[in-house]
Structure formats: structure tokens, C-alpha cells
Image (cartoon, rainbow, N blue to C red):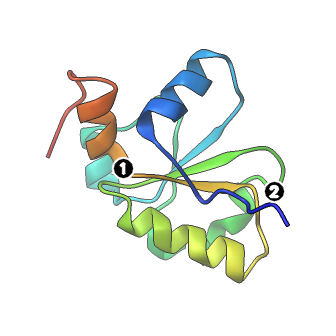
């Protein structure tokens, strides 16, 4: 049985976005963090609201979950996969911190 990937690196996400792949980006950080910095076109959906607002996360097509270092987004991924059976979700490994170091050196860090 082929295993379904659970994470994506910042470099891979960047490459695939540049190639025009249609990801839904879901940022599970808090509003203050999102206001400080976020990936363009990402949806703010704080981790605590994921169970109530899961219908805003598409069920088809790739979804990337984002947080600061990848811990909260991994929690959201676990909920979506194990509780709701979603297999189309990926965790951004290292979060926006990895994006800042591996993809965009001008991306704000905190």
C-alpha cells in the first residue's frame, strides 16, 4: 500500500506554487501572528477553531497547513486525518520559520 505523505518542505511548496499548483493554504496560528506575517492567499483558521470551521478546508485538492514551526499545524493535520478522514492535507515542515530560512530571506521572523 502506498503511504500518503503528511508533510511538505518549504522548498517543495515554493516550487509547486511557482509551477501553478492549486494548494489551499490554511494558517492555524493566532490572528496576531498572522497579521505579523503570512504566506499570500492563506486562510487564517486558528488551531482552536479547526473543529468548528473544518468545512472551510476543502475536502478535494491539496491543502497545506501552516504555523510558526510546524507543531500546531501537525496537530490540525492529526485532527483532520484521524477524526475527519481527510487525506488531502499536508503539514508545512518547519512552518513559516522554515519558509523564512529556506525560501524567502526577507520574510519576517519572530
Q: Secondary structure at mark 1?
A: helix
- Residue at coordinates 29% horizontally, 38% vertically from top-left? 37
Q: Is residue 53 left or right of residue 108?
A: right
Looking at this view, is 77 or 4 the one in front? 4
Q: Residue farthest to the left?
A: 110
Residue 13 appears at what percent x and percent y? 53, 34
Q: Which residue is mark 2?
A: 59
Looking at this view, is 85 or 32 the one in front? 85
Q: Residue farthest to the front?
A: 1
Q: Is residue 82 above or below residue 46?
A: below
Image quadrant assignment for residue 56: bottom right
Q: Which residue is mark 1?
A: 95
Q: Nearer the viewer, mark 1 or mark 2?
A: 1
Q: Is residue 101 above or below residue 46?
A: above
Residue 63 appears at what percent x and percent y? 66, 48
Q: Is residue 25 above or below residue 32?
A: above
Residue 78 appears at what percent x and percent y? 58, 75
Callout 2: 10 Å neighbours few (<14), some, many (20+)? some
- Residue at coordinates 14% horizontally, 46% vertically from top-left? 110
Q: Earlier in the sequence, mark 1 or mark 2?
A: 2
- Residue at coordinates 79% horizontally, 74% vertically from top-left? 85
Image quadrant assignment for residue 70: bottom left
Residue 72 appears at what percent x and percent y? 40, 68
Q: Is residue 32 left or right of residue 51?
A: left
Q: Is residue 107 left or right of residue 74?
A: left
Looking at this view, is 37 or 21 the one in front? 21
Q: Is residue 41 left or right of residue 70?
A: right
Q: Secondary structure at mark 2?
A: loop
Spatial CA distance of label 1 from label 2 is 22 Å
Q: Is residue 35 above or below residue 14?
A: below
Amino acid at each position: 500500500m502506498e503511504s500518503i505523505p503528511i508533510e511538505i518542505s518549504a522548498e517543495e511548496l515554493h516550487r509547486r506554487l511557482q509551477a501553478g499548483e492549486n494548494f489551499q493554504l490554511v494558517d492555524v496560528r493566532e490572528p496576531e501572528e498572522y497579521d505579523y506575517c503570512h504566506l499570500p492567499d492563506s486562510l487564517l483558521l486558528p488551531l482552536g477553531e479547526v473543529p468548528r470551521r473544518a468545512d472551510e478546508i476543502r475536502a478535494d485538492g491539496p491543502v497545506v497547513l501552516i504555523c510558526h514551526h510546524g507543531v500546531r499545524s501537525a496537530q490540525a493535520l492529526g485532527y483532520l486525518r484521524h477524526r475527519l478522514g481527510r487525506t488531502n492535507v499536508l503539514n508545512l515542515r518547519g512552518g513559516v520559520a522554515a519558509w523564512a530560512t529556506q525560501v524567502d530571506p526577507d520574510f519576517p521572523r519572530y
